[in-house]
Each structure stands twice: as C-alpha cells, then as structure tokens.
C-alpha cells in the first residue's frame, strides 16, 4: 500500500530524516515508534505532502506521490490525524465532520452514520462547538473526520496522547475493527508500548532520523525496547 525508500529531509539546515525505509502492506497496522524528536512526525508529514523532501521516494499503491499536492494525496486515499488533533474549535462537531467531506469532494452519505456509530458520543454533540469538547472527544472527532474521506491508508500521530484510559480502549477497538472490516491499512505513530503490542502487525523504530529496528510485532522484545525506546 505504502512504500518509503531512502527518504531524506532537512529543516533549517539540519538533517532530520536520514534514508528512512518503511513499508505499510495492505490491510495491516504498522506502528512507528521512537523517542521524542527522532523524526516520526516529520516522516508522517512527508507522506502527506506537508513536508518537503530532499531525496528518496514515496509510492502509494505502486505509484509515486512525491510530486502530488497534499490535497491530491488525500483524494487518492491517504487520511491524516495529526498530533494535537487540529480540529476547528469554533465550528460545530457536525461542521468539523463535513469539512473532511468538502476537502475531498465527497457527499454526505451512509458513511456519516457508520462513523457516528463508531464514536456514538459525537451524536450527542453534533451542534456543540469542537473547542468545548474534552481531549478524548476531540480525538474521536479528528479520527471520525478522517474516516469520512473513506481512506485506504489511515495515518495517526500519537492518538493516545493525553487521553483517558477508557477512550484509549475505544480508539484501539475502533482501529482493530477498521482493519478487519474495511480492509484499511493503518500507520500509527505511538509511544504507548502496550497499545502498539495489542494492535500492530509490524513495527518500525526510529532513532536520529533513521530506522534502526523493524519486524513483526512478536519480535519487539524487551531487549529491543531497552535499547531504543527506554528513556
């Protein structure tokens, strides 16, 4: 579904990504892990077109997307839920949801009902401003907005950050359901180790802008965690 080869990015004269290699196969959940500041979010922004690259290749469904604008990558089937959620605080929940449809030129259809069934709390707050929702409710809104674009690849940047445990469980259950029912590929940046172990099929670990370990989630041993993830 997604392949990254030798991706390199510099920001302000500093090399941030150093030859990143990563694959997200069809219908699998891949977790990208690493300590703070190693280049995980930069990798996601490079995939979505929000960050310029200086070398390397990104292919989606077998074709290069490096020269595609971010909106065209979204229309091609890539949805992004950024760290911090980035909802529109002065728009209602319903307006926030419809923004995702407008951006991709889609019409409101049965997909809205399906998404609200995944996150039923949003049904109660459709007329409420997004900015007054709790952090967990905003995260559900951000994921729901992304799902309305009917993506083939869903990218999430630390969806559990600052979220209460019961909402983390709900998000985990939802991601598992999406992968099973929708044949959707998911790329997840996450530091909550147990969340990754419960959901992921494969893992990649970044350090200093490069991939330093990867494999099936069963290969994420305590030794690997101590070497690359323990602070």
Image: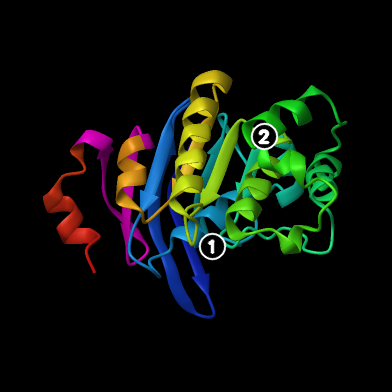
Look at the image and tell me whether residue 205 can be seen: yes
Q: Quadrant of the C terminus?
A: bottom left
Q: Which residue: 48% across, 25% down?
A: 27
Question: Which type of secondary structure does the marked residue at label 2 adopt?
Answer: loop
Q: Which residue: 68% across, 60% down?
A: 86
> Depth-wise, is mark 1 or mark 2 nearer the camera?
2
Q: How many marks?
A: 2
**Does 216 appear in magenta?**
yes
Q: Which mark is residue 54?
A: 1
Q: Give the CA separation, mark 1 to mark 2.
A: 24 Å
Q: Position of residue 114 (x, y in %)?
A: 70, 26
Look at the image and give the residue range highlighted in magenta: 199-218
Q: Hey, which residue is sitting farthest front in the picture?
A: 124
Q: Is residue 62 left or right of residue 25?
A: right
* Structural crowding at the residue carrying mark 2, measured as other residues with C-alpha within 10 Å and reported as few (<14), some (14–19) or many (≥20): some
Q: Position of residue 133 (x, y in %)?
A: 69, 58
Q: Position of residue 115 (x, y in %)?
A: 69, 32
Q: Is residue 214 left or right of residue 138?
A: left
> Of residues 89 and 22, which is closer to you in this image?
89
Q: Is residue 179 above or below residue 194?
A: above
Q: Which mark is residue 77?
A: 2
* Structural crowding at the residue carrying mark 1, measured as other residues with C-alpha within 10 Å and reported as few (<14), some (14–19) or many (≥20): few
Q: Are marks 1 and 2 in contact (CB under 8 Å)?
A: no
In the picture, residue 64 is in which quadrant? top right
Q: Is residue 147 left or right of residue 196?
A: right
Q: Is residue 16 above or below residue 113?
A: below
> Of residues 187 and 12, which is closer to you in this image?
187
Q: Which residue: 73% across, 35% down?
A: 148
């Amino acid at each position: 579904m997604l392949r990254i080869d030798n991706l390199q990015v510099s920001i302000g004269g500093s090399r941030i990504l150093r030859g990143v290699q990563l694959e997200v196969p069809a219908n699998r959940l891949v977790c990208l892990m690493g300590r703070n500041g190693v280049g995980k979010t930069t990798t996601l922004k490079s995939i979505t077109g929000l960050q310029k690259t200086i070398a390397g290749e990104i292919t989606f469904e077998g074709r290069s997307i490096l020269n595609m604008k971010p909106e065209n990558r979204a229309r091609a089937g890539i949805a992004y839920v950024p760290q911090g959620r980035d909802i529109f605080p002065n728009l209602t929940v319903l307006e926030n949801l419809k923004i995702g449809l407008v951006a991709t030129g889609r019409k409101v259809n049965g997909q809205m009902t399906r998404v609200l069934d995944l996150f039923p709390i949003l049904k109660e707050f459709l007329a409420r401003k997004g900015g007054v929702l709790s952090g967990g409710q905003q995260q559900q809104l951000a994921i729901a907005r992304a799902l309305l674009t009917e993506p083939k690849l869903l990218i999430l940047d630390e969806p559990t950050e600052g979220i209460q445990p019961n909402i983390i469980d709900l998000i985990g259950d939802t991601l598992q359901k999406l992968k099973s029912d929708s044949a959707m590929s998911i790329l997840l940046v996450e530091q909550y180790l147990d969340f990754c172990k419960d959901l992921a099929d494969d893992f990649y670990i970044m350090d200093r802008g490069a991939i330093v370990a990867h494999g099936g989630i069963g290969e994420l041993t305590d030794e690997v965690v101590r070497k690359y993830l323990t602070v």
